[in-house]
Amino acid sequence: MRIILNDSCCLIDLRKVGLLRKMLDLPYRMAVVYPVRKFELLSIPEPEWSILEAAGLEIIDVSGELVREAEQVKRLVRGPSIYDCFGFVQARALGRESILLTNDRQLRRLAVLDQVEVHGTLWLLDEFRHHEVLGTAEYIAVLQAWDADETVHLPKDEVQKRYCT
């Protein structure tokens, strides 16, 4: 089963619409690297983490070698946070079984250059629908919630396309 490494922005957007627990119903292993879980997602309380982990969310520790790689990537690429870089190097290390989930444009470009499969939150939403985890009404409600939230930064044209499908 393929593993999806989630960045913080995607997890935050999913949490806003109540989809964190439901993402574990998709036919993927879901994971987050430990530094993101521990230091970047402080808005998610420990009891919620416990529920997610008990339901199957994997927390992956980043080896010392990968920490050094992430620091090097951070120096070379402007934009992504060090936490985003941890997810990227972990996905790269896992190879073809991994998918990096991020909305960060620079990180997506880097992943494509490095031949790491990469998708964003809207792709995952489509997966919810494709695998019948969400029905049409729920799918549209999520799009509307994200569309109305000024802190959610998704491509407007891609959001609009999904209203018509």
Image (cartoon, grey):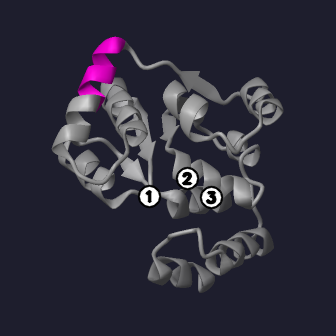
The residue segment tinted magenta is: 64-70
Label 3–label 1 contact, CB within 8 A = yes
Q: Label 2, on which residue?
A: 10
Label 3–label 2 contact, CB within 8 A = yes
Give the residue at x 78% y 24%: 54
Q: Quadrant of residue 17?
A: bottom right
Are there few (<14), some (14-19), or many (20+) residues within 10 Å of tag 3?
A: many
- In the rendered image, residue 150 lying in the magenta stretch gets the answer no
Q: Label 1, on which residue?
A: 103
Q: Earlier in the sequence, mark 3 or mark 1?
A: 3
Give the residue at x 65% y 74%: 149
Q: Is residue 119 above or below residue 85?
A: below
Residue 14 placement (x, y as % from top left): 66, 55
| Amino acid type of the residue tagged 3 in the rendering | Asp
| SS of the residue under disc 3 | helix
Cα distance in 3D space between marks 3 and 1: 10 Å
Are there few (<14), some (14-19), or many (20+) residues within 10 Å of tag 2?
A: some
Q: Which mark is residue 13?
A: 3
| Amino acid type of the residue tagged 1 in the rendering | Asn
> How many marks are shown on the rendered structure?
3
Label 1–label 2 contact, CB within 8 A = yes
> Which quadrant does the C terminus fall into?
bottom right
Q: Is residue 30 above or below residue 145?
A: above
Give the residue at x 72% y 26%: 53
Q: Quadrant of residue 125?
A: bottom right
Cα distance in 3D space between marks 1 and 2: 7 Å
84 or 100: nearer the eye?
Answer: 84
